[in-house]
């Protein structure tokens, strides 16, 4: 959590040497230490408002009081760095001379040009009111403060009566008002001087009476405290959404100071784990390699699963644990990054069966969330049978040897009889046999089968499926038509079994080609997954945003053709015959 604050001493001076170990945060009444603290400097919106009046023409050492104040301001502006973040405005009785200039030299030039006819000038509150109007405009930097310097002579009772309202408005806008009162030192104790001073006190500013011989205040004395603020950071312990409170405590020496308490709303949700391409079927088969005990091995020996983590409340936080559960038992866990990858051993899966997997994660606040239980099937191939791989009892060996001997004797008797028969046959005269030999007939041409095939998971039940995709092969020789039942909220199609649920063995199909969504409104939307050959419905291309399917629609995944059919359609499209109206030859 980040926060900003200011610190001032009893005299109103900014405290610029605070340390993080001197501060702590009270979050909902619980103490939280600061992890970072730094002092920053921001720009100030500077507004100079001149209320020109005849007394400003009074001379001191052959220079008017007006020129003395202007020269002080020009000296300050000329010494201001070009990299300053301040902006500068000049308001007069007749209106603005410059508004929110980012260049101090441009503002100084406007002040140099300003030459009011002091003898004919009529004092008013126009410049002060215009300066406050300008302060209502929002600043690009929310931490940029506003300072208005009002240079005026004593005001009439009519204008004095309006000052409290203007002061209250300035306080609500966050504008600090400072006053240079042009007149005699005794004017500070008059009703006019007291009214102006009350305005500065209410807004956090100061009043200075100038009769010519005094040294005018340095503008930086007004601006420096407004530019400074502290930026703090701490680790929050908030675990529930709702209204929260925060304040700051400063411990310096034996004194403990507590700031005002601020209230804010915060929404907190547990992190949400998302399975990426979870398996629906894992096939294990035996291979020739054996272990040290001369036992046959199944492959694959392990499986790797990836997840993504979402923070629905918009406040990403570090994770401290992630766990993979298979059939409710933890088979792999991470307590160090990366938390998004699992590899679990498949050694325990030696027989085919149905299983479930689930991922559970926990963040630094102790909030945890789990995915749904994802069903998947493990298919284990039959082990290869080996001759003499089983131990045979001695009595069975004896019986086998006896039977083998009898079989050998019978074979020898049969061979002897065959030899005698062949010898007697050889003594007989040969007869000439004539018989026509039929000409070989040409075999019917073999029709090539479709070069593409479909792999449909066993988990896709064909019973009670509300819809299906019927494959159209494009020839009449194919013995059967394949159907893909649609009974899940989402089906994926492609040529890569790791990315797609329904696998098409066709060079025109991308690894992840398309998605078919069953919407809550009981509709079906087909979306292209940025495939190369494209997805088409009724010969029109489908974009990533998808197209609504209707009973009987013709679908192409590359060169593979299907027809979308509902099990219980409420409307069957009928062919429309459009008569030819052209000129026949």
Image (spheres, helix red, strand yellow):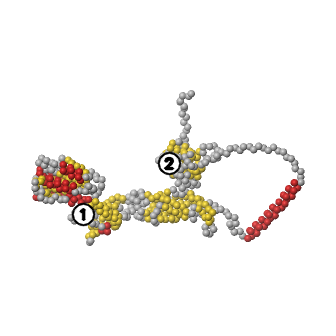
Q: Which residue is mark 2?
A: 528
Crowdedness near tag 2: few (<14), some (14–19) or many (≥20) residues, C-alpha within 10 Å = many
Disc 1 + disc 2, Cβ < 8 Å: no
Examine the image and state in which quarter residue 298 appears. Answer: bottom right
Is 306 situated left or right of 479 in this image? left
Residue in view at x 69 percent, y 69 percent: 391
SS type, badge 2? strand
The image shows residue 181 at horizontal and vertical percentages of 14, 55
Q: Quadrant of the C terminus?
A: top right
The image shows residue 135 at horizontal and vertical percentages of 24, 52
Q: Is residue 311 above or below residue 254?
A: above
Per the rendering, the mark at residue 14 is 1
Per the rendering, the mark at residue 115 is none
Report how far apart the C-alphas of labels 1 and 2 lie in the structure: 62 Å
Q: Nearer the viewer, residue 432 or 230?
A: 432
Residue in view at x 54 percent, y 57 percent: 279
Is 280 situated left or right of 200 in this image? right
N-term mark: 1 or 2: 1
Residue in view at x 34 percent, y 66 percent: 34
Residue in view at x 30 percent, y 55 percent: 141
Is 479 situated left or right of 325 in this image? right
């Amino acid at each position: 959590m980040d926060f900003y604050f200011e610190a001032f001493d009893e005299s109103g001076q900014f405290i610029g040497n605070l340390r993080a170990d001197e501060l702590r945060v009270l979050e909902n009444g619980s103490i939280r230490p600061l992890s970072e603290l730094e002092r920053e400097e921001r720009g100030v919106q500077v507004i100079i408002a001149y209320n020109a009046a005849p007394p400003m023409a009074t001379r001191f050492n052959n220079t008017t009081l007006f020129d003395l104040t202007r020269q002080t301001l020009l000296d300050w502006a000329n010494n201001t760095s070009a990299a300053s973040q301040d902006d500068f405005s000049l308001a007069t009785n007749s209106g603005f001379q410059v508004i929110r200039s980012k260049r101090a030299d441009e503002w100084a030039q406007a002040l140099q040009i300003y030459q009011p006819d002091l003898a004919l000038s009529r004092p008013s509150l126009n410049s002060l009111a215009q300066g406050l109007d300008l302060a209502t405009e929002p600043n690009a930097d929310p931490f940029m403060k506003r300072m208005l310097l009002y240079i005026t002579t004593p005001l009439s009772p009519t204008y004095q009566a309006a000052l409290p309202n203007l002061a209250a408005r300035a306080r609500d806008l966050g504008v600090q008002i400072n006053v240079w009162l042009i007149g005699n030192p005794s004017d500070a104790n008059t009703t006019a001087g007291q009214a102006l001073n009350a305005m500065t006190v209410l807004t956090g500013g100061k009043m200075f009476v100038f009769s010519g011989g005094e040294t005018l205040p340095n503008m930086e004395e007004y601006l420096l405290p407004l530019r400074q603020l502290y930026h703090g950071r701490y680790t929050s312990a908030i675990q529930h959404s709702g209204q929260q409170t925060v304040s700051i405590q400063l411990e310096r020496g034996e004194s403990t100071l507590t700031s005002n308490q601020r209230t804010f709303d915060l929404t907190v949700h547990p992190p949400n784990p998302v399975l990426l391409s979870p398996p629906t079927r894992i096939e294990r088969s035996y291979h020739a390699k054996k272990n040290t005990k001369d036992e046959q091995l199944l492959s694959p020996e392990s499986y790797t699963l990836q997840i993504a983590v979402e923070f629905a409340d918009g406040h990403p936080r570090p994770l401290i644990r992630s766990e993979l559960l298979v059939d409710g038992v933890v088979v792999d866990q991470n307590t160090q990054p990366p938390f998004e990858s699992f590899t679990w051993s498949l050694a325990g899966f030696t027989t085919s069966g149905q299983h479930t997997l689930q991922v559970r994660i926990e963040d630094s606040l102790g909030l945890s969330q789990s995915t749904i239980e994802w069903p998947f099937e493990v298919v284990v191939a039959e082990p290869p049978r080996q001759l003499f791989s089983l131990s045979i009892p001695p009595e069975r060996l004896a019986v086998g040897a006896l039977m083998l001997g009898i079989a050998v004797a019978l074979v020898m008797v049969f061979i002897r009889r065959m030899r005698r028969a062949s010898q007697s046959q050889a003594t007989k005269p040969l007869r000439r046999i004539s018989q026509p030999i039929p000409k070989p007939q040409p075999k019917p041409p073999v029709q090539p089968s479709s070069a593409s095939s479909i792999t449909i998971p066993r988990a896709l039940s064909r019973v009670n499926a509300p819809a299906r995709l019927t494959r159209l092969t494009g020839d009449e020789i194919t013995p059967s038509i394949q159907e893909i039942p649609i009974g899940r909220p989402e089906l994926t199609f492609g040529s890569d079994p790791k990315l797609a649920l329904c696998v098409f063995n066709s060079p025109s199909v991308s690894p992840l080609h398309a998605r078919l969504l069953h919407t809550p409104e009981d509709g079906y939307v087909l979306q292209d997954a940025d495939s190369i050959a494209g997805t088409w419905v009724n010969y029109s291309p489908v974009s990533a945003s998808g197209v609504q399917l209707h009973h009987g629609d013709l679908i192409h995944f590359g060169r593979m053709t299907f027809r979308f059919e509902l099990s219980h359609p409420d409307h069957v499209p009928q062919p429309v015959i459009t008569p030819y109206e052209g000129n026949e030859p």
